[in-house]
Each structure stands twice: as structure tokens, then as C-alpha cells.
Image (cartoon, coloured by chain):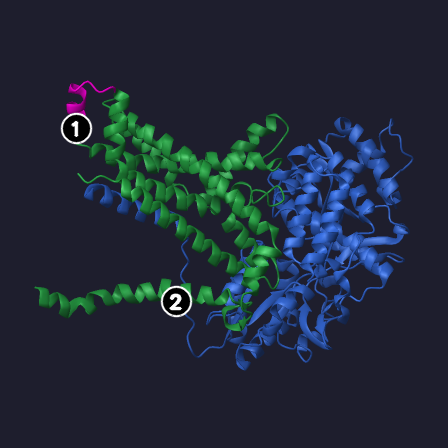
Chain colours: A green, B blue
Amino acid sequence: MEKNMKKYFPVFVLPTFVAFTVVFLIPFVLGIYLSFTEFTTVESATWVGLENYIKAFTQDENFKNALWFTIKFTFVSVITINVISFFLALLLTKALKGTNFFRTVFFMPNLIGGIVLGYIWNLLINSILGVFGFDITYDADFGFWGLVFLLNWQLIGYMMVIYIAGLQNIPKELNEAAMIDGASPFSVLKNITVPMVMPAVTICLFLTLTNSFKLFDQNLALTGGAPARETSMLALDIYNTFYGRIGWQGVGQAKAVVFFLIVAIIAFVQLKITGRKEVEQ
Amino acid sequence: MKKILSIVLSLSFLLCSFAGCSRGGQDNPSSQNITTVRFLNFKPEVANVYDEIAKTYQEETGVKLVVETAASGNYEQTLTAKMGTNEAPALFQINGPKGYANWKNYCADLSDTKLYNHLTDKDLAVTADGKVYGIPYVVEGYGIIYNKEITDKYFALENRTTDLKSMDEIKSFSDLKAAVEDMQKNADKLGIKGVFASTSMKTGEDWRWHTHLANIPVYYEFEDNDVDLSTNETSNIEFKYAENFKNIFDLYINNSVTDKKVLGSKIVDESMAEFALGQCAMVQNGNWAWGQIKNVKGNVVKAENVKYLPIYMGIDDEENQGLCIGTENFFAINSKASDEEQKAAEDFIYWLFTSETGKAFVKNDLEIIAPFDTFKENDAPEDPLAQEVINWMNKENIKTIPWNFTVFPSVTFKNDFGSALLQYAQGTKNWNEVKTIFVNRWKSESQ
């Protein structure tokens, strides 16, 4: 068996390896290379060294603004999404009528594409603000909370399903034993439920963090960065740099590399921290 | 734990499949023997016309024409993506000197092409160092479109406070302002919601202001300073006629169908629909808009009542000002394509604008005013706005304003100016700040 595995290892790995190289490794390396060049298309690149990175941080205030906006947005939406979806999951694992129905309903927003979602929420929010004679482009705060609301609406159901799976995995005996020992519902939650669903927390935090940080479609469709780029997040800013300014494609690429590093570091640190808190059953 | 993992994995696959964008497969790979011309079309509204043209062209000449169309506002993106592939277009468009600067490594010299010889006004072409890199294939004009039915109704009102008797008497901004403001007062009697259609200011829908309207003050400033547009003398601007821009912009937003605080969500289609439905009397746009007006359901505007007025903004001697006429559609041929493909591309555009079949498509289906000497007077499209553009071009003592916005520094400049205009309309920025943004962004984007 062992011998066979060794023998056929390359055969089984090859297709995946080729696919991985073609669709991930090559574009990734090429992308990093392009961030050090000035180019219009991939073929016409000339080496400029670190100039693009310097430009991204010194000559372009939009990038720093977008970074700050994205951090604020991620902070708020990660907390709200996880807290709300966790409590929804708690509620829907109780023996209530129609839990299956509600699980489906809450999950459904996740099935709608980002652009459509952004467009629909744009109409909804504008019609509400319209009553007061405003629209979403009037103030960056409207756009900010609009985005938070939208992403909550979209991701809560999804995270909820993961939490439900985690909750259902907790052995009943633990809860019962705690009850018999006279633990209050709150201390059951704190000392049993939360530690036991830590694996689900890890996954959910990871997904919400990266999804909020990388948000693009919804941002483009809901606010498009208005007013005056104040609500444009990193991904949208990179897109605008790349396509909106002649000769800035390299800078856009440099921003994208920085963006990748930030997302990778955040995700890595978060997985390390929450992973440590997981308990093995 | 395993259970969770498997659920999470399958869910994340699901998520990926929804979040990821799918790339449509390439349709039928061209057979090797037939010469193929690839053309990346700029105008989505005529995509199906080009399909027809491709079919006919292949029947007549045996050359296969593959037309791909970029989505609205995504031409540069699509072109950038396509240029790096084996299926790079041999024929593409640049939008003027700035577009040429971006694509100069890909633009072939067109000085000796057959079509260039037929260009009526050689000044319209994109040139650099005495060579031709872009051939304009359409002439378009924009101004204030008005519905004569509604304005006539106004001039028949007894309680109007102006002495004007018809739109023809409006020769300056002050005339226009007086008439518009009085019309707005009588909006109910005229059966309109506002004189002007909504000033569409949503991101990506604000080009009528940050580009077209801004063209006029920029044109006058460059005229005053004798700026040579083909040099980088254009990188300096002081927005000398900012106040004039403000004049007309204020007139638009204060006498509009829509309250100025909610203009940030309005799109061009809505403005054109308002005009088509008779909810307003005027709208600023170009002759391409006729297609939009015509196709609105419940359209009440009659073709014979659709007229043009130049955009007056209170600049000296503006009584001789005409419409803004020019183009940002220039054919360019990909210098990196094979000689055979380049030749085929050249032959195709020559065919389109000189052969009888090609000309019929241009006149009846593309409905464009072609700037080539093969087009006689009766070859102009029949839509009322195109006719009006031709009328204004032929008027005596009327000075047409060229499209100088092709030298505007970048899309970023335009977008930033557009958002500043929106904030001005919403009342969160004052005019001086808008002016500063215009000047600063122009400078920083010109580097």
C-alpha cells in the first residue's frame, strides 16, 4: 500500500498541481513582478523598482483613506455579523416550531450576487433617505452604515449555519450535567457553549474578516465610493487606480500586493489566536 | 469537528461559486484559412448592428469579422485584458490624444491608409510627430436639447415676464436664465415637473457635467491662452471660467425635475426618460441620445419638436457660439497584429465607409454622421438630433466648439471633479472648493 502510494503520488497530484500552477502560482508571481514595473499590458512592462510602492503611499491620499475606511468597516461588521449570527443560531437550535424554515430564510440572502444586492440596497436606502430629502451619496456615514447593514444582511445567514452546525455538535450530556449542577443559563453559555463552538468561531471570524476586507461588488454597486471616494474601500480603490489613471497600472498592482499582504497577515494572526482557544472533544 | 469542517468546506465552495465571476467561453474558434479581423466595439447599443455587418461583410468579401463589444464604460478595461491575449483586436478605438498616450505602443501609423484620404477634416485625426494614429469615424454634437412643443406653450403664456418670443431669440446665458426661471415658475401650466431633466450625478453617470459641460470653459481658456493641444501645454489650467460653469450648473440643478439633494442617485437613462415623457422641457445631451428618447415607453416627444440650443454660460461673445461638435471615437489599428491582420482591418473600415452596403449600414443602422467625403448630404442619418447637429454646423457666423475634453488628464480627474460637483449640489462643498479641486486634480493627474 505504502509503496503504491509513493509510486502513484505524482500521477494523482499532477492534474491539481498543473491547475494550481497555471491559475494561481503563475498569475501570482507575474502580479508581484508587475508591481515593480510600468506597464499597459502584461507584455509591455519596464522595470521601475520600488517607485510604484512609493507613489502608492506618498502621492495618493486615496489609498490611505481607503485603507482606514476598510479597517473601520471590517472592525464594525465582523463584530456585528458574528454576534448577531451566533445568537440567531442559539435561537434556532432551540426546540421551536419552524426552525428549519427560518434557517432557510436567513440563509437565502447569501445566494444573491453582490452587484445585484448592492443595487437593490441602493434603491431601498435611497427611498428611505429620500423621505428626508437625502440620498446615500450625501454623507460618507450613510454609505458606511449602508455597507455594514448590507454585509450583515448577506453574511449573517451563512455564519449562522456554521454556528448551528457547531452548536449541534455539543454533546447533550455536557449541558445536562451543568444544569444538574445548578449552572445558570449564562454560565452554561459562557463555560460550555462558547468554548465548544470555538472551531466554528475560528471559521466564521476568518470568513467575515476576509470577506469584509476584500469587499468589492457591494461597494461598487451601493456607493461607488461616493461622496468623493470617501466610501471607497481598498479593492475599489485598487480597481480605480488601475483603470482610471493613465500610467498608474503599476501603482494599482503595487497596491494590490500590499493589499494581499495585509489580508494574509490578518488572516494568519487571527487563525493562530482563535485556533489556540479551540478545545478538542 | 469533522462534521463542521465538511459543512464549512462545502459551503465555502458554494460561496466561491457565487462570488466568483465566470468568464464566458470564446465563441467558435476561427478556422485557420480565413483572414479574420477582430474589432473591439465601443458602443454596446449598436452591438447587434455589428453582428449584421459582420455577416454581410463575410458574404461580400470572404473575410471574417469578429466583433466583440465592451460593456458600457468598460472599454479601457476590456481592451487592456484583450491586448495581452492571442485574440487581441486588430482594430480598436482610442478616445483621443490621451487614449493614444496610453496605447502608443499599439497604434500603427495610419497616414497611408485609404480611409484617411477620405477624411474631410484632417484636423480631427489623432496625430503625433506628423503621423496619424487615430481616424475619427463619427462626428457627434451636444448641447441643450429642448422640446419645442413645451417651449411654444410657454411663449404663448400671457403672464410670462420675459420679452422673448421664441427659442431662436435666446442668444446668451442671461436670455436663457430669464426664460428658464420663468418657465419653472409656470411649471404647472406647462404640464412639466421642472425645466431641466435630472442632473444625473451618480458615479459613472456624471460625464455630461464633468466632461461635456466642463469642455466649454476649458475650450475658452485654451483659446485665450493659445494653447497647443498636442503638447503638454494643456497640463496647466486655472479654470478661469469657473463662474460661468457655475452659472449654467446652478441653472440646471435649481430648475430641475429632481431636488438637488438627491441627484447623487440619478442616472442618464432617467434624465432621458423624463424628457421623453414630457416631464421636462430641456436636457443637456448629444445626438446619440435620440435612440434613448425614441425607445422610452410612453414617449410623447415628437421628432419634429426636438431641437438644439447651444450651452450658453455667460462668456463674452457667446451669441455666435454653436454646439459642441467633435468625437472621441477614433479607429486605431493594432501595430502588434500581423501585417495581414492590419491590412484586413484597414480594408474593413474602408469598406464600411465607402462601399454602398457599408454606407447603408452607417446611415440606417449605426445612425452616425460620418466625417468622410464619400458621404453626401443625403447620406446623413435621419434622426432629428443628427439633422440638428448638421444644421448648426452649417449655420453662418456660428462658431462650433470642438471636443477639447479629449485632452482632460484622466478618468480620475473627471471622477473627482464629478464628485465635487455632486457635493456642491448637495450643499456640502462650496464653489471655491470645487474650483480648487478642479485645478489641483488637473495638475496632479497631468504629471
Q: Quadrant of the N terminus of chain A?
A: bottom left
Q: Earlier in the sequence, mark 2 or mark 1?
A: 2
Q: Quadrant of residue A5?
A: bottom left
Q: Is residue A10 left or right of residue B217?
A: left
Where residue A202 appears, x then y in whole percent? Answer: 31, 42
Where residue A268 appears, x then y in whole percent? Answer: 36, 50
Residues at marks 2 and 1, CA–CA distance in whole angstroms? 50 Å
Q: Give the letter of the chain under mark 1.
A: A
Residue depicted at 75% across the width and 68% down the height: B230
Residue at which label 2 appears: A26
Kindly identify which numbered label has been placed on residue A132.
none
Residue at which label 1 appears: A174
Q: Is residue B248 left or right of residue A71?
A: right
Q: Is residue B366 above or below residue A201?
A: below
Circle 1 sits in a helix, a strand or a loop, which is it?
helix
Where residue B247 appears, x then y in whole percent? Answer: 81, 42
Instruction: Give, as a single range, the part of the protein colored magenta.
Output: A172-184
Q: Is residue A62 visible?
A: yes
**Most foreground residue, B60 or B353:** B353
**Most foreground residue, B46 or A266:** A266
Q: Is residue B69 visible?
A: no
